[in-house]
Image: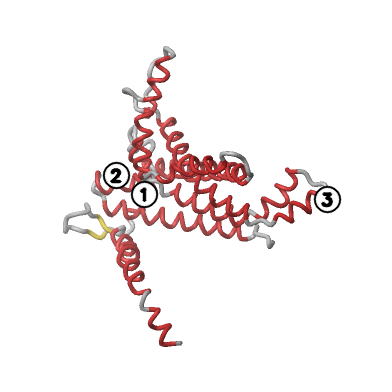
Amino acid sequence: MKKRNRQMNLFYIPAVALMALFVVYPFFRAILISFCKWNGYSENIRFVGLDNYIYMMTDRKFWNAFGNTLLYGFGSTFLQNVFGLAFALLVNSRFKGNKIVRTVVYMPIMISSLIMGYIMYYFLVFDNGVLNDIIGWFGKEPQNWLGNPVVGRVAITLINSWQYVGNSMIIYLAGLQNIPQMYYEAATIDGAGKWASFKRITMPLLVPSISSAVILNLIGGLKLYDLVVSLTNGGPGYTTHSVMSYISNQYFTQEKAGYSAAIGIFIFLFIVLVSAIGNHYFAGKEVDM
């Protein structure tokens, strides 16, 4: 048996090797680069200690991107979970067209976020944009939607929420179908209404699903990149950048590889911290069936 187990362990080697090559090594390499001044391609790398981290603390463009990231992360998470739960409750009931609703809600996930951003760009762009064409039919002047930072931030948050709400729906639907029906039958016998059953039975027993959906959506929102790049590219100016798109800008456009690595380490630690706090909070809310 021990020999068989040792042989089975050999199958872990390719996965561990790939993980070490594409995750562990780049991570520690990024930590090293974050203490250096480097343009990203030359052999001239100079150690500067904590200078990149100190500069990050005073970089207004970075803090603007960080504020946007909080909006994209927490705003999208809120919307995805509220509407994901609503759709899950809807499709969990039996009605004609149930499967069609599931498919329509889930379909946007099948499109790359980069492609989704480009699709929505042609809805919101000033020249010949779909939205401007529609308001033009009513005699209204075209608007430079993506030239407005507020509209850009709201559009990114809403589009990201809409694209991934189906993921939350599936998670909540699985949780709803795992709740024993006898609990609701007992509540009905005791005279509890639908709202009381939802509050006292559904929500407490959905905590594991809520935990999974919230943490996954939050991580996805906090590392949002491709939708920002394809929809606004961080503009106008730097007003709609997320931290991830700002890292790309600093590395490839500004040629500040060391500084972008420092930002990457910061946002990595922030996401780990937020995830740990979220997991700890929801772990204390779980109840046994």
Quadrant in the picture for the N terminus: bottom left
Residue at position x 36%, y 78% in the image = 10
Image position of 238 with respect to 279: above or below: above
Q: Position of residue 45 (x, y in %)?
A: 21, 59
Q: Residue furthest left?
A: 43
Image position of 126 with respect to 105: above or below: above
User: Dot 1: few (<14), some (14–19), or many (≥20) neighbours within 10 Å?
Assistant: some
Between 236 and 230, the one nearer to me in the picture: 230
* Image depth: mark 3 or mark 1 in front: 3
Task: Give the labeled residue for mark 2.
Answer: 249
Task: Give the labeled residue for mark 3.
Answer: 190
User: Dot 2: few (<14), some (14–19), or many (≥20) neighbours within 10 Å?
Assistant: many
Q: Position of residue 283 (x, y in %)?
A: 61, 60
Tell which circle, 2 or 1, labels the residue nearer the N-terminal end.
1
Residue at position x 47%, y 58% in the image = 272
Give the residue type at disc 2. Asn
Query: Distance of mark 2 from mark 3, alpha carbons?
Result: 61 Å
User: Dot 3: few (<14), some (14–19), or many (≥20) neighbours within 10 Å?
Assistant: few
